[in-house]
Amino acid sequence: MDGHRASEFVVAEPVVTAVPVEGGRGAFPVRRVYCVGRNYASHAVEMGVDPGTEPPFFFCKPTDSVVSNVLDAVAVPYPPGTRDLHHEVELVVAIGKGGVNIAADDAVRHIWGYAVGIDMTRRDLQQAMRQAGKPWEIGKTFERCTPVGPIVPIGDTGELASGHIALMVNGELRQVSDLSKQIWSTREIIATLSRLFTLMPGDLIFTGTPEGVGAVVDGDLLEAKIEGLPALQVRIGPVSQGVAA
């Protein structure tokens, strides 16, 4: 069956994951999280891959891995099973209008807004799985691994096809680039995804990270910025009691 009444659930239903809209203008409910792999040439090179040899490829993260906080840094506990936790700053696209087989020229009409995101990655686990020819989901998925800043409506920002993107750790610049250096534009990403999946309102798309990814440790403060969007701060460490997701 496609749907059930709440009274039929045999366990408590999951809490709806949502990201705040900038300025206290409500919240954006999250349906799915899609991520684009190696979408900046320099990052592909630092991962040991020729950026000119493959079309866009995608992976997904669980919806409930998305965490956000308006007033304070988002807490991301150092996850188990890794000794090499990495940061990856990315432009996040929030889909407001669904569709399939969307033309690239029409893709902007499907965007609700934009945010700054960080794709936290257990790099050692990801690389071990890749070298073994196995899926590397365990490298990309764990609790609170997908922090996202407040979403800004596209009506406020216009289309973001260029702009400064950067990430600092404890005030030290680690990643810096420009959105214009993406191999596949946001329009192309939406068009390609919509040929593989039915995009729906509530979907988030992480559009790839530039070069400079690196390790973080307990206590580190990350600050991710994209020109025209609210900054996102993440603290590596335990979640304080009473802190919002």
Image (cartoon, helix red, strand yellow):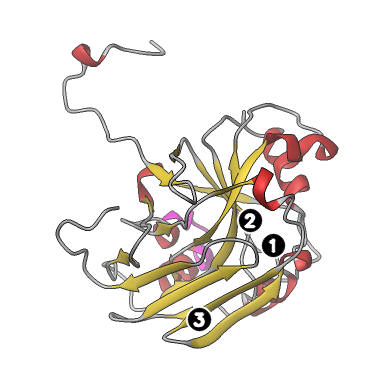
Residue type beneath disc 3: Met
Mark 2–mark 1 Cα distance, whole angstroms, equals 7 Å
Magenta span covers which residues? Answer: 130-137
Query: CB of mark 1 within 8 Å of CB of mark 3?
Result: no
Disc 2 or disc 3, which is closer to the eye? 3
Residue type beneath disc 1: Asn
Q: Nearer the viewer, residue 121 or 102?
A: 102
Q: Residue 175's image quarter?
A: bottom right
Height in image: 159 above or below 6?
below
Q: Which residue is mark 1?
A: 39
Height in image: 15 above or below 93?
above
Q: Which residue is mark 3?
A: 168
Residue at point 49%, 70% (across, down): 127
Q: Position of residue 229 (x, y in %)?
A: 59, 61
Query: CB of mark 2 within 8 Å of CB of mark 1?
Result: yes
Mark 2, secondary structure of its residue: loop
Mark carried by residue 224? none
User: Earlier along the polypeptide chain: callout 2 or callout 1?
Assistant: 1
Q: Position of residue 184 (x, y in %)?
A: 77, 56
Q: Position of residue 1 (x, y in %)?
A: 38, 10
Q: Nearer the viewer, residue 22 or 202?
A: 22
Mark 1–mark 3 Cα distance, whole angstroms, equals 20 Å
Mark carried by residue 207? 2
